[in-house]
Image: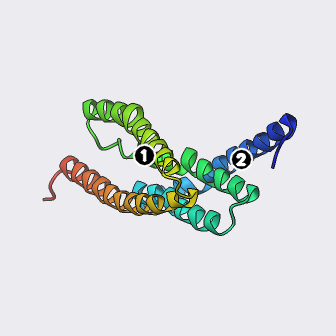
Amino acid sequence: ALTLRDWKTAYFGDLSFRMNTIGVMVQVFITPFVHKAWGPGAGLAFLPVAVLGVIGTISGAPDLAVLGLAWISLNSLGYSINQSSKELLYVPADRDFRWKAKAVIDAFCFRLGDAAASALALALGALGAPSRWLFLPGVAIALGWLWAARWLGREFRARVNRAERSRTPPAG
């Protein structure tokens, strides 16, 4: 749809501006409220819910405007509430575990996920499958992601509660 280099530059520049603007607004106005009211588990649920919405929307109307909105929404949520929620999960962990886990997650797990998604897309392409078939594992991954967000939210609350009880002197 975009053939001239200047048009592409303007299009992606506009997408990046919108994504960053929405990301800042989510970070400033929504993230603190969600974390105070429900904790990081709820914050981690925003992105997989958006993924499910994007899959539903793109499967019904796969055009450039819809793809642009999908890119804006997923990246703005990923760079704001999802990132903050993920970082908040490290708070109740001891320092040694935090540094090791963060390194493994940031350096290995994210790259493994990217590589697995690329391998799946290449495999489906080699089999001649339509690109819409990628939606099926996407839905399964997003549902598993929601389950993980819920579990992580509960685990975070349990660890914080244990830490608070261990610091509170007994009554009496």
The residue shown at (80%, 44%) is: 11
Task: Inspect the image, locate mark 1, and give the three-letter code of the amino acid beneath it.
Answer: Lys
Give the mark, 2 or 1, whose residue is nearer the N terminus. Answer: 2
Residue 61 % position (x, y): 69, 66
- Circle 1: is it few (<14), some (14-19), or many (20+) Cα within 10 Å? some
Secondary-structure class at tag 1: helix
Residue 133 seen from this side:
yes
| Residue 156 in picture, x, y percent from top left | 31, 53
User: Pointer 2: what residue?
Assistant: 21
Which structural element holds mark 2? helix
Q: Using the image, tell me which numbered label, if any, was put on residue 63.
A: none
Colouring method of the image: rainbow
**Residue 152, relative to residue 118: is it above or below?**
below
Residue shown at 36% from the left, 30% from the top: 103
Callout 2 amino acid:
Thr
Q: Nearer the viewer, residue 35 or 66?
A: 66
Q: Measured from the top left, where is residue 30 in percent x and y?
A: 58, 57
User: Which residue is tagged 1?
Assistant: 86
Do callouts 2 and 1 mark residues in contact (Cβ within 8 Å)? no
How far across and how far down the image is residue 98, in percent? 31, 35
Which residue is depicted at the point 80% across and 40% down?
8
Nearest to the observer: residue 144 or residue 88:
144
